[in-house]
Image (cartoon, rainbow, N blue to C red):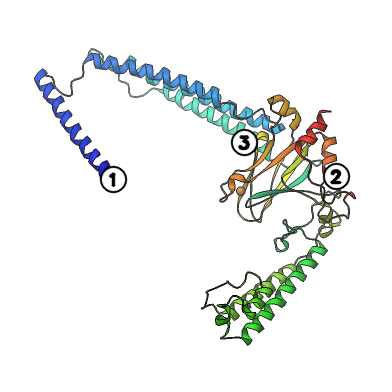
Amino acid sequence: MNLIIVLLVVLAIIAIAQLTKVYDLSRTLRNSREEEITPADNRLNANAWVIWMYVFFASTLYLYGKYGDYLPESASEHGVSVDRLMSINIWMITIVFFIVNYLLFTFAKKYQYNPGRKAKFFTHDNRLEMLWTLIPGVSMAFIIVYGLITWNNITGPASADAMQIELYSKQFDWTARYPGDNKVFGAADFNLIGTTNGLGIVTKEGIQSKMEELDTEMENVKAAIELVKKENGNLIQHRQHSNSILSNMLNGLMPNFFPSEGSATVDYVAALEDELYRLQRHKQRILDLSENELNGLSQWEAGNDDRIVKGEFHIPVGQEVEFVFRSQDVIHSAYMPHFRAQMNTVPGMPTRFKMKPTITTAEMRKKMGNDKFDYILLCNKVCGAAHFNMKMTVIVDTPEDYAVWLAQQKTFGGSKEAPSDSTGVETPKADTLTMAANH
Ligand SMILES: [Cu+2]
């Protein structure tokens, strides 16, 4: 295959060389020189430039028409000003684009080579300098100042009556958390993250059970160390028989810690002692947690009535929402295109974004004539293999529907402050709610 390609390229080069020779010969026969360009050539080129200009303009307008409005109207208050800023910029760029390209191509035609014409020569013109400094300078200053004003309005502090929602990102999903009736988020700490506590919310019970879990693990490691020491030398031999008693005992104590085969060179005692040390440090970090207060409320108590939501989250229309973003692993970016909202989520550093939704999901579906439409929260930072699938549905409800939905969500502490039927209740599907909203 490669040989054929090489042959083709070589043949093409030879063909071009031969053609050039034929062309040169024909010129010599016609008695014309290579660098000589006829007025007909010039006219052809000049007209071709102008035709190309029209094609260029037409395709630009076509693309504007086709892709100019790739998003429906903004569904948030600040989004309107983002859109206005965007369209002012686009208008300015478009006007300049048409003027500059019109001059470029028509001048190519107008000033095509003419042996009788003499160029005008001048060294300096103050008016010209003034013009081409002031116009771009003022336009740029306008864009920057207007942009900064808009940006400051969007990113300024949230108002006092804004409700808060935490959006927690990790590879590769989102979790939303609503503070309970006390309006205070429970404290969170990564040392407590586990299968039943994905956000690492700190509660006395949570600390207790995590400590017990760590204690059990440490006991098991110690027992494993004893076993390995007692059977030292025989271990490797034993492990080669997958059903050996020792092997089963070790795996029972520490599932997944010992490889099922091979690893003859591993010093098991040292590896187990490392593991013990790691567990001790983990335990110490939990012991070091301090019980802080917020609004006269222990932050360890505050977490019990937090509501934790996956898959889709709801916000009430017309209510300012302040999102607090956290990340467990890498930098993600929370992007809600229909609300013109985007903010990076950074491990170890909460970030914020406030907005007021103005159009409910039901209204937007009607406007778009699409009863399947949903607002969406996407990850907009390439964060790993399943980045493309890191999304969550956002439902904008009327305040009444929102209250109904929120009351159905499970609380972190379980039955404590939740309505009696809250456990085991699945998040209601979007269509049930919007159907309710339509009635
Ligand atoms: Cu991500």
Mark before the other along the chain sequence, 3 or 1: 1
Taking 390 as reference, is 264 above or below it?
below
Q: Earlier in the sequence, mark 2 or mark 3?
A: 3
Where in the figure is residue 72, as x and y percent of width and height?
Answer: 65, 28
Q: Quadrant of the N terminus?
A: top left
| Frontmost residue, 370 versus 375 | 370
Q: Earlier in the sequence, mark 2 or mark 1?
A: 1
Q: From mark 2 to mark 3, how far is it between C-alphas?
A: 40 Å
Q: Where 389 falls versus 261 (above or below)?
A: above
Q: Which mark is residue 407?
A: 2
Label 1 crowd bin: few (<14), some (14–19), many (20+), radius 10 Å: few
Nearer-the-camera pick, 203 or 183 = 203
Q: Which residue is mark 1?
A: 2
Q: Give the residue at x 38% y 16%.
A: 51
Left or right relative to 233: residue 170? right
Query: In the picture provided, is 334 more to the left or to the right than 22?
Result: right
Callout 1, which amino acid? Asn
Mark 2 vs mark 1: give the one in front: 1
Task: Work out how far the residue at label 2 is from the one at label 1, CA to CA, in angstroms.
Answer: 68 Å
Tag 2 near tag 1, CB within 8 Å: no
Residue 212 in sight here:
yes
Identity of the amino acid at label 2?
A: Ala
Which residue is tagged 3?
Answer: 148
Question: How far apart, in angstroms, are the residues tagged by discs 3 and 1?
Answer: 57 Å
- Say which mark, if any, is on residue 151: none
